[in-house]
Amino acid sequence: MTTITEDKAAPGQLALIQALVNTQYGQSRRTHTELTSPEQMRVWLVAHNLLPDGIPVTEGDFRRFLQVREALRALLHANNDGEVSLTQIEVLNNLASNAPLTVHFQLDGRPALEPDIADIDGVIARLLGIVFTSMIDGSWDRLKVCRNERCQKAFYDTSKNRSGAWCSMTGCGSRSKANAYRQRHNEQNAQ
Ligand SMILES: [Zn+2]
């Protein structure tokens, strides 16, 4: 039995991962796309306090950043009964090897993972650090990609038993229910 949760933001810094994945979702005419050029990506990074203003973003940076986004989307699929894509794991490991993190103790004595490199690889390092930390604190498991293949929007599953499968009840959830009903109905008629 799967339940449906409404669009909720992930807690803390995990919201940044959700925002990144949701710079694109949906297919064909319904597609939502925010990052279609290096300049748009630069503006997005500045707006999310990930990059100081005035630092140029190259085509190569742009390509790597979209690779990170889609590899993270693939990981989030696995949180919604999907399988981990080995190809995407390899992509993540390649990107991570150029994006080193160091343990940095904060003023309150608690450690945090921080990028040990500047520019876009530093941004990638910061994002992967957030993923790592959220996997340890358990919040990661609740960040999922909508089970509707034509949607794939990232949502935070706030249901008690972590059974949320769709990004919204009014959208993908109700469509999925309608499809299931139609299928049952057709099967009954065929008997
Ligand atoms: Zn959806």
Image (cartoon, rainbow, N blue to C red):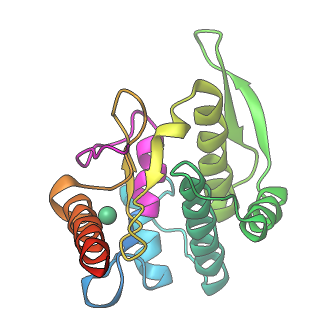
Residue at 15% from the left image edge and 58% from the top image edge:
170
Instruction: Report the number of discs.
Output: 0
Please, what is the dominant secondary structure of the magenta stretch? loop
Q: Nearer the viewer, residue 57 or 97?
A: 97
Q: Is residue 21 above or below residue 136?
A: below
Residue 175, position in %: x, y? Answer: 22, 68
Determine the residue positioned at 28% across, 46% down.
4
Judge left or right: residue 167 versus residue 86: left
Residue at position x 45%, y 60% from top?
A: 20
Q: Is residue 48 visible?
A: no
- Taking the image in four quarters, ligand 1 sits in the one at bottom left
Q: Is residue 66 visible?
A: yes
Q: Is residue 105 left or right of residue 141?
A: right
Tell which of 117 and 157 is nearer to you.
157
Q: Nearer the viewer, residue 59 or 140?
A: 140
Measured along the vertical axis of the image, is residue 57 above or below residue 148?
below
Left-right relation of 172 to 143:
left
Whether 13 is among the magenta residues is yes
Furthest residue in direction bottom, as rendered: 28
Residue at 54% across, 68% down: 55
Give how far across and how far down residue 75 sits, in percent. 62, 56
Outermost left residue:
170
Give percent across and percent down for residue 59.
61, 86
Q: Residue furthest top?
A: 108
Q: Is residue 45 magenta?
A: no
The quadrant of the picture occupied by the C terminus is bottom left
Magenta residues, start to end:
1-21
> Horizontal and vertical percent for residue 183?
30, 73
The answer to which quarter of the image holds residue 103 is top right
Q: Quadrant of the N terminus?
A: top left
